[in-house]
Image: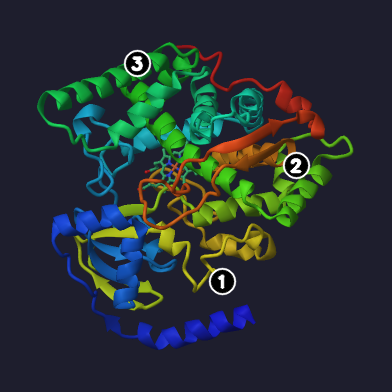
Amino acid sequence: MEVLSRKLHRRRRSSREDTIQSIPGSHGHKFISSFKLQQQGNLYFKTLQQKYQQNVFRINIGVRAIALVDNRVIRILFQNDKVTKEDGVGNYITNYNLMDSLRPSIFSDQKDRMSRNSFILQTLAAMQDKYIIQQTYNSIEDHFQRWNKTYQPTASKSIQPSWDDGIQHLCCDIICRLFIDKTVNFESIFQWYVQALQKIKVPGLLKQRQCADIYNTYIELFKEIENSTYLPYYLNTGRQCSLSDEYAKENVLFGIIFNAFGSCEAIMRTCAARIGILSHEDRNQLRQEIQSTLGEGNDLSLAALTKMKRLRSFVAEVLRTSSPISLIFRRAKQDMFIQAYTGTYKISKGHLLVGNIHLAHRDPNVFPEPDTFKPFRFYDDPELIRHMIWEAGVYPDEAKNLSHQCPGKKMMMILLQLFCMKLLIHTEFQFDVTPDWNEKHLHSLGCPDGCLTLNQFSYDPAMFKIKLSDDICNSHSPFLHCED
Ligand code: HEM
């Protein structure tokens, strides 16, 4: 029935697609629009979509752009022969001077892009699944043991530490252990990451002081890379990719730690929130799947994780509903026609295009009941995965040199599956306040609106014994034993 209604929906649309639609809306006033964006986030895009009844419209988000908000039209942003990626993220990245020549949106189409891209892709390809599982699993166990003590019921609820901090800290440790073989001061990473992306609003001397603070944190983190036992690997690989030693180190900090930490910490917090509010029935189904896959002496391995199709569906649904990155920007390289579900539109060379992943993942043309969180949506209809575009690419494509697709997919899926699996099977927890989402915040990276505070957390690995395969236990870092 659902499939039939989607077909009818599409047929009604097709007559509109034959003619060229004019792009509705005006770019409006920069400050008013920026204010609205700040206040309303993704809802600002949604309001305009409803107002114009079109999936392509003009918008001003501090920069004049053309918004693309359905699951079909957004794909033009992945056709690199037609669009180009520029430095920065629209005009969001304001502290250029504090980042040397580098940006978090790191692989703009600049001339050394090929070298930097190869460097990251080669590094991620060298990291074997079993090593990722081993490091991630060990970090999770360490932190869950600690959380057993940290998140205990106290007389005064107000001193209960936020779980967001705990999860961010865990994520930071996993990423740093994987990439530089040690944990680093979590506060430094976090401060630098947040402040580097924020406009400095204080005036004069205070501004100078804040800049100095951010810069000092950058230097501190840079030293951590220089002191890592993996440094010879990075210098060697950098040279193979024609990167100077300094540039290789900067790319580890930005391309790997900044990108990986920024997105993973947010999606981990959202996964935890979603697990906490799952119905008993759904939670039990997930638990049963994990227990039947790992029961009867079956070891934990990548193959076992792949078999957990309900768990993978749950993670995919979290990514669909709460993609940490909502907006992607590209500039048209040529005049062209683009196809949306609401018609065909003409784009001129030089137009800045902004795709809204949040809305493309809620497109009713492809996702039935798009606003409802359905943990087994992708289990029930595996084909739906082809409409997921959180990684700035089309499933099942993998990131390639010059594709701009996120290269962190494999690592991130292992990390999230392990985190969710352990939470489901070995913990009991309860929130003080039930997590909730509105679509207003762009900066919350898909996480619930308020802080996650727990009134109870217990970790008991004896509840169900998990054995890591010998392969995983004995795996070694791919980055050691490399001649400088
Ligand atoms: C849930 C986790 C993640 C999400 C949602 C995510 C999302 C994205 C998106 C949307 C882009 C494209 C940005 C744009 O073009 O404007 C991107 C690029 C990138 N991501 Fe991820 N990412 C995640 C995890 C990771 C991880 C674990 C790494 C590991 C190193 C990583 C490394 C990168 C890099 C290096 C780029 C730049 C690619 C290029 O421009 O060629 N990401 N990511």
Spot occupied by residue 439 in the image (x, y as percentages of width and height):
41, 58
Alpha carbon separation for disc pair 1 and 2 = 30 Å
Q: Earlier in the sequence, mark 1 or mark 3?
A: 3
Residue 302 location (% of width, % of height): 70, 38
Residue lying at 13% horizontally and 61% vertically, measured from the top left:
29
Quadrant of res 7:
bottom right
Q: Which mark is residue 422?
A: none
Earlier-in-chain disc, 3 versus 2: 3
- SS under mark 3: helix
Q: Decide: few, some or many residues near mark 1? Use Cα within 10 Å; few <14, some 14-19, many ≥20.
A: some
Question: Can residue 337 be seen here?
Answer: no
Tags 3 and 2 touching, CB below 8 Å: no
Residue 390 seen by the camera:
yes
Q: Nearer the viewer, residue 46 or 480?
A: 46
Three-letter code, disc 3: Glu
How many numbered discs, if any? 3
Residue drawn at x 31%, y 62% is 44
Query: SS of the residue at dot 2?
Result: helix
Q: Is residue 213 left or right of residue 115?
A: left
Q: Kindly identify which numbered label has been placed on residue 304.
A: 2
Q: Amino acid at mark 1?
A: Pro
Q: Amino acid at mark 2?
A: Ala
Which residue is most to the front? 155
State how the image is colored: rainbow
Indicate which label's residue lies in the foreground, 1 or 2: 1
> Please, which residue is most extreme toward the right here?
296
Nearer the viewer's eye, disc 3 or disc 2? Answer: 3
Q: From the image, tell me which residue sits under label 3.
A: 220
Q: Which residue is mark 1?
A: 368
Figure quadrant of the N terminus: bottom right
Task: Report, in whole angstroms, how far the alpha carbon at label 3 lies from the one at label 2.
Answer: 39 Å
Secondary structure at badge 1 equals: loop
